[in-house]
């Protein structure tokens, strides 16, 4: 499992990730290496990103006997609140069988420079998935803080065995962005 933020702020000199132990991690932009490191025995790695200009970068993590992981990371200059997902995980003891209920936990972080208020998130699927709970109200998140919601979303597994890949869209809203 890879845990890597989808946003880096220009006022933060490091980008911390969690990957497989001893994995190689790298951040590139337009095919050029920005930063790279090896994870420690616990899978923790920190990349030095001081001086990085706004724009998109590509993060990758690779380790022996693991499938390479790729993710686009936005580099932004913070101005007001900016809320991003830091974890979207299936709740413990969840089974993926036809007709079962799947519950999703959500963690949101405000990487901006001021508090985000009236924060809520919605999860949707255009793939015929029956959503039981498709939104969660989080309230306020201070600058540089994280808030987690257990069982934020839930849906029923489809009756068809054809669901190997079920795409979802997560939207996060806060005051003045609706």
Image: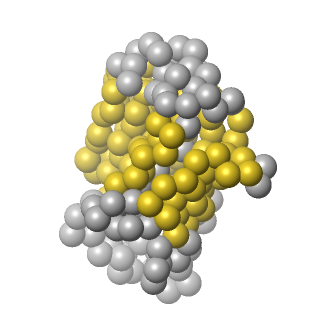
Q: For residue 19, which quarter of the picture? A: bottom left
Report whether 8 appears left or right of 23.
right
In the picture as drawn, the residue positioned furthest to the right comes out as 30
Task: Look at the image and tell me whether residue 36 can be seen.
Answer: yes
Position in image of residue 173 (x %, y %): 52, 29
Position above or below: 70 against 12: below
Residue pictured at 47% horizontal, 73% vertical: 63
Image quadrant holding the N terminus, namely bottom left
Position in image of residue 41 (x %, y %): 29, 65
Residue pictured at 35% horizontal, 42% vertical: 107
Position in image of residue 101 (x %, y %): 32, 66
Residue pictured at 64% horizontal, 46% vertical: 34
- Who is closer to the viewer here, 127 or 61? 61
* Labels in figure, total: 0
Residue pictured at 32% horizontal, 51% vertical: 105
Report whether 93 appears left or right of 58.
left
Image quadrant holding the C terminus, namely top right
In the picture as drawn, the residue positioned furthest to the bottom comes out as 161
* Display colour scheme: secondary structure
Report whether 139 appears left or right of 50.
left
Task: Look at the image and tell me whether residue 133 can be seen.
Answer: no
Position above or below: 147 against 28: above
Position in image of residue 77 (x %, y %): 61, 22
- Who is closer to the viewer here, 110 or 12? 12
């Amino acid at each position: 499992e890879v845990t890597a933020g989808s946003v880096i702020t220009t006022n933060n000199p490091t980008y911390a990730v969690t990957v497989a132990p001893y994995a190689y991690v790298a951040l590139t932009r337009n095919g050029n290496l920005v930063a790279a490191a090896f994870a420690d025995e616990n899978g923790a790695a920190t990349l030095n990103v001081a001086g990085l200009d706004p724009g998109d970068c590509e993060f990758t993590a690779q380790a022996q006997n693991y499938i390479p992981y790729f993710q686009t990371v936005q580099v932004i200059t913070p101005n007001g609140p900016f809320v991003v997902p830091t974890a979207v995980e299936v709740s413990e003891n969840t089974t993926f069988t036809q007709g079962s209920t799947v519950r999703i936990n959500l963690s949101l972080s405000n990487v901006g420079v001021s508090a985000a208020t009236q924060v809520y998130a919605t999860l949707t699927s255009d793939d015929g998935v029956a959503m039981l709970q498709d939104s969660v109200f989080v309230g306020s998140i201070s600058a540089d803080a994280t808030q987690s919601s257990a069982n934020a979303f839930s849906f029923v597994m489809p009756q068809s065995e054809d669901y190997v890949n079920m795409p979802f869209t997560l939207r996060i809203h806060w005051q003045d962005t609706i």
